[in-house]
Amino acid sequence: MRVTDIMTARPLTLGENDSLETARRLMQDMFIRHIPIVDQHGRLAGLVTQRDLLVASLRKDEGTPIREIMCTDVTTVSPQESLRRAAEIMIYNKYGCLPVLVEGRPEGIVTEADFLKLAIF
């Protein structure tokens, strides 16, 4: 099996200039914990997690741009990566997700929840 078989396609993304409040609201409304952040060309610029927002809420204003807190050193995979390799990356690095890129653009996201769904079906 490949990442494309279990990933969430067309992930919700935000831009670098969107606010922390926008990210928080999107996570709450859509019940998600990870948001890929894209630049003006739609290429992955970073990643914001629920944990990032919790930490930032203690010292940043809700109007702060996401670019100030996003992680920019993001490990990614292609849709054709094996599930085993993706799982290894997530487990050994303690990642909750991996953005799935095609030509630098987020085409999907694979999360711990996707692997759990696979286990019960």
Image (spheres, grey):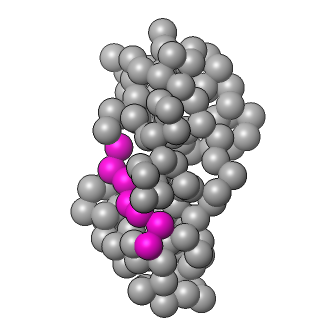
Magenta stretch: give its range: 11-17
Q: Residue 87 at x, y = what percent?
A: 61, 26
Q: Position of 80 compared to 4: left or right? A: right
Quadrant in the rendering for residue 84: top right
**Where in the figure is residue 47, as x and y percent of width and height?**
54, 55
Q: Residue furthest left?
A: 29
Q: From what the image shows, is residue 64 above or below residue 112? A: below
Residue 66 visible in the displayed image: yes
Judge whether residue 112 can be spotted in this image: no
Give left or right: position of 104 versus 107: right
Q: Nearer the viewer, residue 40 or 51?
A: 40
Residue 92's place in the image compared with 59, above or below, is above
Q: Residue at x 57, y 30 (%)?
A: 77
Q: Say which quadrant the C terminus sits in.
A: top left
Image point 47% across, 22% down: which residue? Answer: 79
- Front-lying residue, 79 or 121: 79
Quarter holding residue 92: top right
Residue 71 in the figure: left or right of residue 119:
right
Q: Residue furthest front?
A: 41
Q: Nearer the viewer, residue 120 or 89?
A: 89
Question: At 59% across and 75% down in the image, what residue appears?
Answer: 68
| Residue 54, percent from left and from top | 53, 73
Residue in the image at 63% along x and 60% along y: 71
Q: Quadrant of residue 70?
A: bottom right
Q: Is residue 47 magenta?
A: no
Helix, strand or loop for the magenta stretch, by majority: loop
Compared to 9, does 42 lie above or below? below
Measured as percent of width and height from the top left, residue 110 is found at: 47, 34
